[in-house]
Amino acid sequence: MKQTKNRQWRLASHPIGLIKDSDYKWHEESIPELKDGEVLVRNIYLSLDPANRGWINPATAPHYVKPVSIGEVMRGICIGVIEESTNSQFENGEIVTGLLGWQDYFICDGKGLTSLSLFPRPEKAPLSIYLNVFGMIGLTAYFGLLDIGKPKEGETLVVSAAAGAVGSLVGQIGKLKGCRAIGIAGTEEKCSWITKELGFDAAINYKTESVRDRLKELCPNGIDIYFDNVGGDVLDTALGELNLHARVVICGMISTYNSMKPVSGPHNFVRILTKRALVQGFIVTDYFDRMTEALIDLMSWYSSGKLKYREHIVDGLENAPIAINKLFDGSNKGKLIIKISEEP
Amino acid sequence: MKQTKNRQWRLASHPIGLIKDSDYKWHEESIPELKDGEVLVRNIYLSLDPANRGWINPATAPHYVKPVSIGEVMRGICIGVIEESTNSQFENGEIVTGLLGWQDYFICDGKGLTSLSLFPRPEKAPLSIYLNVFGMIGLTAYFGLLDIGKPKEGETLVVSAAAGAVGSLVGQIGKLKGCRAIGIAGTEEKCSWITKELGFDAAINYKTESVRDRLKELCPNGIDIYFDNVGGDVLDTALGELNLHARVVICGMISTYNSMKPVSGPHNFVRILTKRALVQGFIVTDYFDRMTEALIDLMSWYSSGKLKYREHIVDGLENAPIAINKLFDGSNKGKLIIKISEEP
C-alpha cells in the first residue's frame, strides 16, 4: 500500500549544549504529486554523525557547511530507494544516497542523488554498509589516515574515539599498513572490542586511566600519527607526547561540540613547533574526486575479512532526536543509524 | 698583536622569565696551544635569535635541541675568521660559520665549521649578511613560506613579527610570489618601514590597534597563509580569520618564551578543523640539504634590489646578555647581532 504521508523532523531551535527533544518539531504533511523529471525516494537508513551537531549551530558559530535554518527539515545522509520516477536517469527500485533528510520521503529532480547501483555490495551485507565502511565513514578513515597521516611501517598510531565508526576503521587500516595501533575509548567493553576483535595493540580507557601516563608507557618513542576525533583534553595530552615530525589528523572534536562556554585551546600547542609536527584539519568531501581508489581498497580489505565494523541501529524516525545524543554520551556501540523503513 | 686571552659568557642558571645578567657568568681563560689538526677561529659576529631562549630552558621543558648545561659556554651562531690552522682543510684568513659560541675564540678540529669561501658575497655587503639574508634567517623565511605556506598568486599572506629578521623577508618573498602581504608589528616605525620600504600592502600595530578588527577589514576573504613568529594571542586571533584550506607556518612563538606560567592554547584551534587548515611546525635545519636552491634565489633577489634588510648591531661581547632581551621587548630594529671583533 502506497503511503501518502511524509513524517519529518524539522529544526525548531538551535540547541544550546546537548540536543533536546524540543529543538526539533515533528511535522507531517502529504506527499505531493511528482512534477515532470522528479523522483520520490523512500528513506531506509538515516546516518547520525557527530558533524550533524555543527550543522545546527547558529550561523555565527564556526562551521563547515551552511547551517540548517529554523523550520527546515533536519539535514541527514540517508540510503533510500526510488519508489516513483518521472526522471529517465532513475528507475523504480534503484538504491540511492544523498542528503535526504530526517524524513520518510524525499522528492527532487535527481540533483544531489547518487545511485548505488554501480557500487558492488558484498553478499549478505545490509544496505547500511554504504553509511559505514563503504560510505563517508570509510572514506574519512581512509583519506584521513593515508593521505594526511601517511603511515609508515613500524610507526605508532594513536586514535581517539577508537571504538567509533571512523576510529575503529582507522586503527584497522593502520595495522594493515604495519603500524602499532593504540586506541583511546570510554568503556571497558569498547577497549576490549578494539583489542580482541579488531587487532589494536593496546587500548586506553580515558574514563578510568590517566591518558598521559598510559601514552608515555605505550609510546616510549612518542606518537608518530595521532588521529583525533575528540579534541579537548585528550588532544592536548596527545600533543604532549608527539614524536619528531608527527602528523596530527584533525577529523573531529566531539568533546567540544556541546560546550556551552568557549573551549580552551591545547596548552601543548607549542609541541607543534618543537616537534616540527603537521596538524591538518580535513573534511571527507574534499576527497570525493578520489573516491574510487578508496573504495577499491576498502572493498578488498572488507571482503577478505580484514576490516570489521559494527553498527548501532535504532528503529524508527521518531527516535532520531533522542538517539543522536548517544554519540555525545558514548552509549552507542558502532555506527549510529536510524532505520526509517525496511530494505526492499 | 696576537691575543692570548679568550673571553666567554657561560651559562650560570636557567633563566626564569626574561634573561637576567646573572644568568650568565663572564669567564676569561688563556687560549690553549692548538693540537694537530685543530683550527683557531676568531669570532667576528654573533647572531642573537629568539630560539636562543629555548636553548637555555631546563632540560625538562619542550625543546628542539639539547639545552645548554650550567657552566657551558653559551651556544650561538657566529661568523669568524681562521687565525691559525693546523688542519689542511682550512687556511688562515678563511671565513667560517658555525655554533662558535658567545666567546672571542673557538677551537675545534674542523667539525661543525662551514667555510663561506665558496659562497658569493655581494659587493660591499658586510660579513654579517651570512647571519641574515644568506644565513639561517633567509633560509627560514624561504622554506617556511615556500615549502609550507605554498603561496599562490593573489593569496593573502599575514606575517607576525613582520619587521623582524625573518618576518621582513617573508613578506617580501610573498610579494615576489604575487601575494598581498600584511604585516603585524609593535611600533609605528616598524609598520612604516615594512609598508614604505619593503612593499608590504598593509601593517597592523598590535600594540595600538585591534588585530582582530584590522584583520577582518584587511582580509575580507580570510587569511590564506599565516606565517607565525609569535604564538599567543596574535596566533589565536589569526586562526580565527583563516580562509578555507589555509596554511599556518609555525616558525616561532616568541611571545611565550619567557612565560613564567603555562601558556594557554589557542581558543580558535577548532578553526583548523572547520577551515580544513594545515598547521606545520618546522626548523630550518630540516632543510639544510636543500640550501643551494634557496641561496640561488635569495642571492638573485637581493642583488636585483628585491630583498631589503636591516641589522641592529650591538658592539662588544660583554653586552650580549643584555642585548638579547631586545628580541623580547621588541626594541631591536632588524637582525640583532653582536659585533665581537673587526672584519678582516
Image: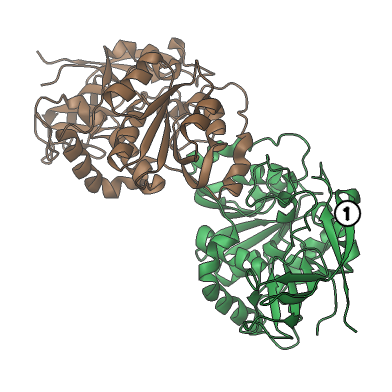
Chain colours: A green, B brown
Please report the residue visible at 12 percent of the width from the left and 16 percent of the height from the top.
B2
- Write down the quadrant of residue B149 in the picture: top left
Q: Residues within 10 Å of mark 1 (few under 14, many from 20)?
A: some
Q: Is residue A235 left or right of residue B68?
A: right
Q: Amino acid at mark 1?
A: Lys
- Write down the quadrant of residue A210 in the picture: top right
Residue assigned mark 1: A25
- The number of numbered discs placed on residues in the rendered structure image is 1
Please report the residue visible at 50 percent of the width from the left and 36 percent of the height from the top.
B220
Quarter of the image for the N terminus of chain A: give it: bottom right
Label 1: chain letter: A
Q: Of residues A36 and A41, which is closer to you in this image?
A: A36
Q: Relative to B209, does residue A145 appear above or below in the rendering?
A: below
Q: Is residue B37 left or right of residue B261?
A: left
Mark 1 lies on a secondary structure that is strand
Q: Of residues A68 and A84, which is closer to you in this image?
A: A84
Q: Is residue A110 left or right of residue A79?
A: left
- Note whether residue B60 is visible: no
Q: Relative to B162, does residue B269 appear above or below in the rendering?
A: below
Q: Of residues B224 and B308, which is closer to you in this image?
A: B224
The spot of residue A264 in percent (x, y) is: 68, 35
- Write down the quadrant of residue A17 in the picture: top right
The spot of residue A235 in percent (x, y) is: 65, 46
Q: Of residues A78 and B75, which is closer to you in this image?
A: A78
Quarter of the image for the C terminus of chain A: give it: bottom right
The spot of residue B41 in percent (x, y) is: 19, 27
Please report the residue visible at 35 percent of the width from the left and 40 percent of the height from the top.
B179
- Note whether residue B139 is visible: yes
Q: Relative to A151, does residue B114 appear above or below in the rendering?
A: above
